[in-house]
């Protein structure tokens, strides 16, 4: 029996990368249904189709995670069509090229905070609304980053947002313990996803240099290895793990 047997799971940022890998893993672990969300409708549908092709049940909802009414409608729709929700992986995010702090435009700072932090607040709010009303407990995982612990040079927005995700995670873990709703965070190291490769699908010299320094064997992480931690935290095998931040980087942060 898979570790997610009988569970309905929500995943944001599911059009590819870590979220896409997680959607496949949740299904492979026996989830009843995986509800995939992303703003990239075309890649999202392909990701949902991959879950179905592997024998899973999947739905695709394309919307912007900073839009509260869209987030609320998604969670409401999944709960209505599937009868409940059990777990959620709040994972969508963006990044921007590194910029000296004193040159960073306020608009860019606010955009990254909106997508990488406010969206996590919105997803948590509406997921908790359902989980509390259901009274069935539940498990939520938020994606932070190594930048949630150690500042990423030239990334004030990303660093602030990912630190903030850890704060929200701990607050929810503490306040919803009495509802048996767990909330944890994963902190990926440098992982081979579209976010890191950028539009040209090429690793820039700067990224390649960072990979050499920040990973134990000089290689990017496989998204599946990061997703596996999120799936475990959502499963009952992690039922006593709450409010924790799990770094998944092969030990790179220790370098
Ligand atoms: N790749 C890495 O090295 C790395 C390292 C640390 C943390 N992370 C984190 O991992 C998570 C997943 O990133 P990834 O590496 O798989 O990158 P990715 O770019 O493949 O995935 C992010 C997904 O989020 C979606 N998204 C972005 N803005 C959105 C919005 N406003 N509304 C809806 N969807 C939106 C994108 O379309 C994309 O599919 C992110 O939270 C990222 O910050 C990644």
Image (spheres, rainbow, N blue to C red):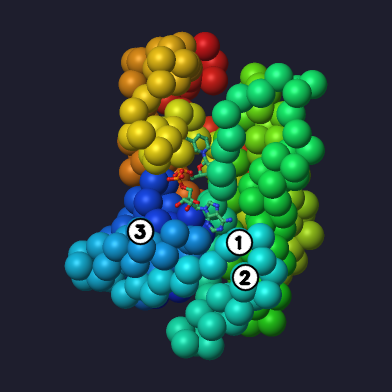
Question: Closer to the camera, 224 or 48?
Answer: 48
What percent of the width, then of the height, locates residue 187?
55, 37
Please report the residue visible at 66 percent of the width from the left and 55 percent of the height from the top: 120
Numbered label attached to residue 71: 2
Residue to which mark 3 is pinned: 43
Q: Is mark 1 within 8 Å of ligand 1?
A: yes
The kind of secondary structure element at disc 2 is helix
Q: How far apart, in angstroms, are the residues tagged by discs 3 and 2?
A: 19 Å
Please report the residue visible at 33 percent of the width from the left and 21 percent of the height from the top: 219
Question: Closer to the camera, 18 or 208?
Answer: 208
Question: Closer to the camera, 88 or 117?
Answer: 117
Q: Quadrant of the N terminus?
A: bottom left
Question: Closer to the camera, 42 or 249?
Answer: 42
Q: Is residue 33 above or below residue 25?
A: below
- Give left or right: position of 97 versus 192: right
Is mark 2 in CB contact (under 8 Å) with mark 1? yes
What percent of the width, then of the height, locates residue 102?
79, 21
- From where the camera sits, is residue 239 visible? no
């Amino acid at each position: 029996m898979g570790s997610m047997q009988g569970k309905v799971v929500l995943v944001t940022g599911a059009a590819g990368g870590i979220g896409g890998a997680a959607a496949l893993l949740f299904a492979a672990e026996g989830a009843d249904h995986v509800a995939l969300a992303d703003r990239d409708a075309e890649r999202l549908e392909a990701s949902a189709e991959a879950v179905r092709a592997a024998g899973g049940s999947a739905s695709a909802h394309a919307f912007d995670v900073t839009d509260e009414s869209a987030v609320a409608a998604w969670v409401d729709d999944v709960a209505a069509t599937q009868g409940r929700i059990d777990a959620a992986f709040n994972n969508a995010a963006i990044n921007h090229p590194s910029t000296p702090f004193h040159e960073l435009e306020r608009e860019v700072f606010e955009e990254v905070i909106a997508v990488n932090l406010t969206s996590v607040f919105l997803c948590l709010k509406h997921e908790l609304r359902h989980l509390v009303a259901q009274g069935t407990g539940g498990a939520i995982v938020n994606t932070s980053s190594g930048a949630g612990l150690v500042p990423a040079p030239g990334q004030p927005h990303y660093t602030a947002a990912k630190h903030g995700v850890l704060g929200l995670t701990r607050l929810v873990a503490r306040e919803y313990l009495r509802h048996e709703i767990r909330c944890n965070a994963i902190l990926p190291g440098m992982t081979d996803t579209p976010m890191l490769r950028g539009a040209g699908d090429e690793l820039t010299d700067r990224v390649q240099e960072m990979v050499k320094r920040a990973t134990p064997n000089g290689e990017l992480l496989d998204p599946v290895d990061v997703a596996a931690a999120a799936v475990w935290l959502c499963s009952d095998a992690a039922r006593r793990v709450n409010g924790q931040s799990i770094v998944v980087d092969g030990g790179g942060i220790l370098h």
